[in-house]
Protein backbone atom coordinates (compact mmCIF):
# COMPACT_ATOMS: atom_id res chain seq x y z
CA UNK A 1 0.00 0.00 0.00
CA UNK A 2 1.31 3.42 -0.93
CA UNK A 3 1.63 5.38 2.32
CA UNK A 4 -1.75 6.02 3.91
CA UNK A 5 -3.56 6.31 0.57
CA UNK A 6 -6.71 4.19 0.43
CA UNK A 7 -7.12 1.71 -2.40
CA UNK A 8 -10.25 1.53 -4.55
CA UNK A 9 -11.25 -0.75 -7.41
CA UNK A 10 -13.73 0.20 -10.13
CA UNK A 11 -15.06 -2.36 -12.59
CA UNK A 12 -16.20 -1.13 -15.98
CA UNK A 13 -13.88 1.85 -15.51
CA UNK A 14 -13.29 2.57 -19.18
CA UNK A 15 -16.53 4.41 -19.96
CA UNK A 16 -19.57 6.14 -18.53
CA UNK A 17 -20.34 5.84 -14.83
CA UNK A 18 -17.28 3.71 -14.09
CA UNK A 19 -15.01 6.23 -15.74
CA UNK A 20 -16.61 9.10 -13.81
CA UNK A 21 -16.26 7.25 -10.50
CA UNK A 22 -12.64 6.26 -11.18
CA UNK A 23 -11.67 9.84 -12.02
CA UNK A 24 -13.49 11.21 -8.97
CA UNK A 25 -11.75 8.72 -6.67
CA UNK A 26 -8.35 9.50 -8.18
CA UNK A 27 -8.94 13.22 -7.69
CA UNK A 28 -9.92 12.52 -4.08
CA UNK A 29 -6.53 10.92 -3.47
CA UNK A 30 -7.30 7.20 -3.77
CA UNK A 31 -5.10 4.70 -5.52
CA UNK A 32 -7.48 3.16 -8.06
CA UNK A 33 -7.45 -0.19 -9.83
CA UNK A 34 -9.29 0.24 -13.13
CA UNK A 35 -10.84 -2.99 -14.41
CA UNK A 36 -12.61 -3.59 -17.69
CA UNK A 37 -12.56 -5.61 -20.87
CA UNK A 38 -11.09 -2.96 -23.19
CA UNK A 39 -7.58 -1.91 -22.21
CA UNK A 40 -7.65 1.05 -24.62
CA UNK A 41 -10.68 2.54 -22.86
CA UNK A 42 -9.08 2.02 -19.44
CA UNK A 43 -5.91 3.75 -20.60
CA UNK A 44 -7.97 6.69 -21.88
CA UNK A 45 -9.51 7.05 -18.42
CA UNK A 46 -6.02 7.13 -16.90
CA UNK A 47 -4.95 9.73 -19.45
CA UNK A 48 -7.88 11.95 -18.45
CA UNK A 49 -6.79 11.72 -14.81
CA UNK A 50 -3.93 14.11 -15.62
CA UNK A 51 -1.80 14.77 -12.53
CA UNK A 52 -3.48 11.88 -10.69
CA UNK A 53 -2.67 9.19 -13.27
CA UNK A 54 0.30 7.88 -11.28
CA UNK A 55 -2.23 6.62 -8.69
CA UNK A 56 -3.99 4.41 -11.28
CA UNK A 57 -3.37 0.79 -12.22
CA UNK A 58 -5.00 -0.76 -15.30
CA UNK A 59 -5.99 -4.44 -15.13
CA UNK A 60 -7.87 -5.83 -18.17
CA UNK A 61 -10.67 -7.99 -16.75
CA UNK A 62 -13.79 -9.87 -17.82
CA UNK A 63 -15.90 -9.96 -14.65
CA UNK A 64 -18.02 -12.81 -16.03
CA UNK A 65 -14.97 -15.11 -15.99
CA UNK A 66 -13.96 -16.45 -12.53
CA UNK A 67 -10.29 -16.85 -13.47
CA UNK A 68 -10.12 -13.28 -14.73
CA UNK A 69 -11.66 -11.96 -11.51
CA UNK A 70 -9.25 -14.00 -9.37
CA UNK A 71 -6.35 -12.58 -11.35
CA UNK A 72 -7.66 -9.02 -10.85
CA UNK A 73 -7.75 -9.36 -7.08
CA UNK A 74 -4.43 -11.20 -6.92
CA UNK A 75 -2.76 -8.37 -8.82
CA UNK A 76 -4.42 -5.79 -6.54
CA UNK A 77 -3.13 -7.59 -3.47
CA UNK A 78 0.33 -7.92 -5.02
CA UNK A 79 0.59 -4.20 -5.82
CA UNK A 80 -1.18 -2.61 -2.86
CA UNK A 81 -1.51 -5.31 -0.23
CA UNK A 82 -5.14 -4.42 0.49
CA UNK A 83 -8.44 -3.10 -0.89
CA UNK A 84 -10.58 -0.49 0.86
CA UNK A 85 -13.31 0.21 -1.72
CA UNK A 86 -14.86 -1.96 -4.43
CA UNK A 87 -17.29 -0.29 -6.83
CA UNK A 88 -19.11 -3.08 -8.64
CA UNK A 89 -20.08 -1.09 -11.70
CA UNK A 90 -19.51 -3.28 -14.77
CA UNK A 91 -22.75 -4.00 -16.57
CA UNK A 92 -24.51 -4.37 -19.91
CA UNK A 93 -28.12 -3.74 -20.89
CA UNK A 94 -28.93 -6.32 -23.54
CA UNK A 95 -31.07 -5.71 -26.62
CA UNK A 96 -34.33 -3.77 -26.37
CA UNK A 97 -36.60 -6.43 -27.80
CA UNK A 98 -39.88 -7.98 -26.64
CA UNK A 99 -39.42 -10.51 -23.85
CA UNK A 100 -40.70 -13.36 -26.00
CA UNK A 101 -38.07 -12.66 -28.66
CA UNK A 102 -35.05 -12.77 -26.34
CA UNK A 103 -32.65 -15.61 -26.98
CA UNK A 104 -31.16 -17.67 -24.19
CA UNK A 105 -27.72 -16.36 -25.12
CA UNK A 106 -28.89 -12.72 -24.85
CA UNK A 107 -30.42 -13.38 -21.44
CA UNK A 108 -27.39 -15.25 -20.15
CA UNK A 109 -24.87 -12.63 -21.31
CA UNK A 110 -26.59 -9.95 -19.22
CA UNK A 111 -26.90 -12.21 -16.17
CA UNK A 112 -23.25 -13.29 -16.46
CA UNK A 113 -21.94 -9.72 -16.38
CA UNK A 114 -24.44 -7.83 -14.25
CA UNK A 115 -25.18 -10.42 -11.57
CA UNK A 116 -22.59 -13.18 -11.65
CA UNK A 117 -19.80 -10.67 -12.27
CA UNK A 118 -20.85 -8.63 -9.26
CA UNK A 119 -20.99 -11.78 -7.13
CA UNK A 120 -17.55 -12.97 -8.24
CA UNK A 121 -15.96 -9.61 -7.45
CA UNK A 122 -17.77 -9.42 -4.10
CA UNK A 123 -16.57 -12.91 -3.20
CA UNK A 124 -12.93 -12.07 -3.95
CA UNK A 125 -13.25 -8.74 -2.12
CA UNK A 126 -14.50 -10.60 0.97
CA UNK A 127 -11.48 -12.90 0.91
CA UNK A 128 -9.09 -9.97 0.74
CA UNK A 129 -10.90 -7.55 3.08
CA UNK A 130 -11.44 -10.09 5.89
CA UNK A 131 -7.76 -11.07 5.93
CA UNK A 132 -6.07 -7.67 5.61
CA UNK A 133 -4.91 -5.42 8.45
CA UNK A 134 -6.75 -3.29 9.35
CA UNK A 135 -9.61 -5.62 8.56
CA UNK A 136 -12.64 -4.62 6.53
CA UNK A 137 -13.62 -2.43 3.64
CA UNK A 138 -16.58 -1.14 1.65
CA UNK A 139 -18.42 -2.54 -1.35
CA UNK A 140 -20.64 -0.28 -3.44
CA UNK A 141 -22.95 -1.92 -5.97
CA UNK A 142 -24.25 -0.09 -9.01
CA UNK A 143 -27.94 -0.83 -9.03
CA UNK A 144 -30.28 1.27 -11.16
CA UNK A 145 -33.67 2.82 -10.86
CA UNK A 146 -34.57 -0.31 -12.82
CA UNK A 147 -34.10 -2.07 -9.49
CA UNK A 148 -37.42 -0.38 -8.59
CA UNK A 149 -39.32 -0.05 -11.88
CA UNK A 150 -38.64 -1.49 -15.33
CA UNK A 151 -38.52 0.09 -18.72
CA UNK A 152 -40.33 -1.64 -21.59
CA UNK A 153 -38.42 -4.51 -23.21
CA UNK A 154 -35.74 -4.72 -20.51
CA UNK A 155 -36.34 -8.08 -18.80
CA UNK A 156 -32.68 -9.19 -18.44
CA UNK A 157 -31.41 -5.82 -17.22
CA UNK A 158 -34.34 -5.26 -14.85
CA UNK A 159 -34.13 -8.78 -13.42
CA UNK A 160 -30.40 -8.46 -12.72
CA UNK A 161 -30.77 -5.06 -11.08
CA UNK A 162 -33.52 -6.38 -8.81
CA UNK A 163 -31.15 -9.23 -7.97
CA UNK A 164 -28.35 -6.77 -7.19
CA UNK A 165 -30.57 -5.31 -4.45
CA UNK A 166 -30.87 -8.75 -2.87
CA UNK A 167 -27.13 -9.31 -3.19
CA UNK A 168 -26.45 -5.90 -1.62
CA UNK A 169 -28.56 -6.78 1.42
CA UNK A 170 -27.02 -10.25 1.78
CA UNK A 171 -23.52 -8.78 1.43
CA UNK A 172 -24.21 -6.11 4.03
CA UNK A 173 -25.45 -8.76 6.45
CA UNK A 174 -22.68 -11.30 5.84
CA UNK A 175 -20.02 -8.61 5.92
CA UNK A 176 -20.83 -7.32 9.40
CA UNK A 177 -18.60 -9.81 11.19
CA UNK A 178 -15.65 -8.78 9.04
CA UNK A 179 -16.22 -5.00 9.21
CA UNK A 180 -17.23 -4.99 5.55
CA UNK A 181 -19.93 -2.46 4.67
CA UNK A 182 -22.04 -2.76 1.52
CA UNK A 183 -24.37 -0.23 -0.07
CA UNK A 184 -26.05 0.37 -3.40
CA UNK A 185 -26.31 3.40 -5.66
CA UNK A 186 -29.31 3.50 -8.00
CA UNK A 187 -28.74 5.83 -10.94
CA UNK A 188 -31.21 7.34 -13.36
CA UNK A 189 -30.40 9.04 -16.68
CA UNK A 190 -26.76 9.96 -16.12
CA UNK A 191 -25.49 11.38 -19.41
CA UNK A 192 -23.17 8.83 -21.03
CA UNK A 193 -22.80 7.28 -24.48
CA UNK A 194 -25.36 4.66 -23.41
CA UNK A 195 -27.99 7.31 -22.64
CA UNK A 196 -27.45 9.43 -25.74
CA UNK A 197 -30.74 8.13 -27.12
CA UNK A 198 -32.59 9.88 -24.28
CA UNK A 199 -32.19 13.17 -26.20
CA UNK A 200 -33.89 11.68 -29.26
CA UNK A 201 -36.60 9.84 -27.38
CA UNK A 202 -37.10 6.47 -25.70
CA UNK A 203 -40.13 4.27 -25.25
CA UNK A 204 -42.34 4.99 -22.26
CA UNK A 205 -44.66 2.60 -20.41
CA UNK A 206 -47.59 3.88 -22.49
CA UNK A 207 -45.78 2.96 -25.70
CA UNK A 208 -45.09 6.52 -26.81
CA UNK A 209 -41.58 7.76 -27.58
CA UNK A 210 -40.51 10.74 -25.46
CA UNK A 211 -37.34 12.74 -24.83
CA UNK A 212 -36.04 12.38 -21.27
CA UNK A 213 -33.90 14.80 -19.25
CA UNK A 214 -30.42 13.66 -18.23
CA UNK A 215 -27.85 14.81 -15.65
CA UNK A 216 -24.08 15.26 -15.75
CA UNK A 217 -22.41 11.91 -15.03
CA UNK A 218 -19.87 13.74 -12.85
CA UNK A 219 -22.56 13.98 -10.18
CA UNK A 220 -22.55 10.19 -9.96
CA UNK A 221 -18.79 10.18 -9.44
CA UNK A 222 -19.19 12.66 -6.61
CA UNK A 223 -21.90 10.50 -5.02
CA UNK A 224 -19.69 7.42 -5.14
CA UNK A 225 -16.86 9.38 -3.49
CA UNK A 226 -19.23 10.41 -0.70
CA UNK A 227 -20.32 6.82 -0.08
CA UNK A 228 -16.69 5.70 -0.14
CA UNK A 229 -15.55 8.41 2.25
CA UNK A 230 -17.68 7.34 5.21
CA UNK A 231 -16.01 5.61 8.15
CA UNK A 232 -16.87 1.91 8.30
CA UNK A 233 -19.14 2.52 11.30
CA UNK A 234 -21.55 4.29 8.91
CA UNK A 235 -23.09 3.17 5.63
CA UNK A 236 -25.29 4.53 2.87
CA UNK A 237 -27.39 1.42 2.39
CA UNK A 238 -29.24 2.75 -0.64
CA UNK A 239 -28.85 6.00 -2.56
CA UNK A 240 -30.88 7.11 -5.57
CA UNK A 241 -29.35 9.80 -7.78
CA UNK A 242 -31.27 10.76 -10.89
CA UNK A 243 -32.07 13.51 -13.34
CA UNK A 244 -34.55 15.70 -11.45
CA UNK A 245 -37.13 15.90 -14.23
CA UNK A 246 -36.95 12.39 -15.59
CA UNK A 247 -40.26 10.46 -15.62
CA UNK A 248 -39.53 8.12 -12.75
CA UNK A 249 -41.82 9.39 -9.99
CA UNK A 250 -45.49 9.44 -10.99
CA UNK A 251 -47.90 7.48 -13.12
CA UNK A 252 -47.32 6.87 -16.80
Image (tube, grey):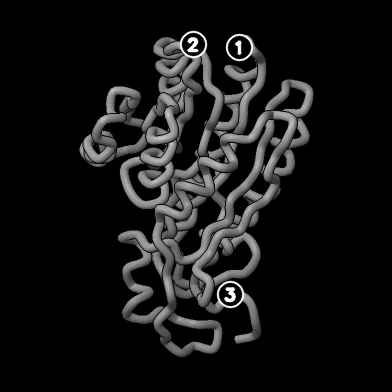
**What residue is shown with label 1?**
132
| Label 2 packing within 10 angstroms: few (<14), some (14-19), many (20+) | some
Relative depth, front residue between 66 and 104: 66
Of the numbered discs 2 and 3, the one sitting upstream in the chain is 2
Circles 3 and 1, Cβ within 8 Å, touching? The answer is: no
> Residue 78 has which mark?
none
Instruction: Estimate the x, y position of residue 106 in percent, counting from the top left.
Output: 43, 57
Residue at horizontal 43 percent and vertical 65 percent from the top: 215
Local SS, label 1:
loop
Dot 2 or dot 1, earlier in sequence? 2
**Residue 160 seen in this snapshot:** no
Q: Which residue is mark 2?
A: 81
Left-right relation of 199 to 6: left
Residue ID for mark 3: 248
Q: Nearer the viewer, residue 156 or 21?
A: 21
Q: Residue at x 46, y 55 (%)?
A: 219
In three-dimensional space, the C-alpha distance between marks 3 and 1, rounded to whole angstroms, equals 41 Å
Using the rendered view, name the quadrant where residue 14 is placed.
top left
Quarter of the view holding residue 37: top left
Distance from disc 2 to disc 1, alpha carbons, whole Å, reads 8 Å
Give the quarter of the image for residue 169: top right
Marks 2/3: CA distance?
42 Å
Query: Which comes sooner in the sequence, label 3 or label 1?
Result: 1
In contact (CB < 8 Å): disc 2 and disc 1: yes
Q: Are marks 2 and 3 in contact (CB under 8 Å)?
A: no
The crowd level at tag 3 (other Cα within 10 Å; few <14, some 14-19, many 20+) is some
Residue 101 in view in this figure: yes
Rendered residue at 39%/65% (across/down):
95
Amino acid sequence: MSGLRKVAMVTGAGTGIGKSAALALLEEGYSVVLAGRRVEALEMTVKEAGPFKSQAVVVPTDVSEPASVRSLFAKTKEIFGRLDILFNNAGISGPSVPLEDLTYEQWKSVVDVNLTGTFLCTQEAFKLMKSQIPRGGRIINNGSISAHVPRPNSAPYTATKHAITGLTKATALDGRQYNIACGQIDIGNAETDLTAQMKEGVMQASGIIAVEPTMDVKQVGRAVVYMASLPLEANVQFMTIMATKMPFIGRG
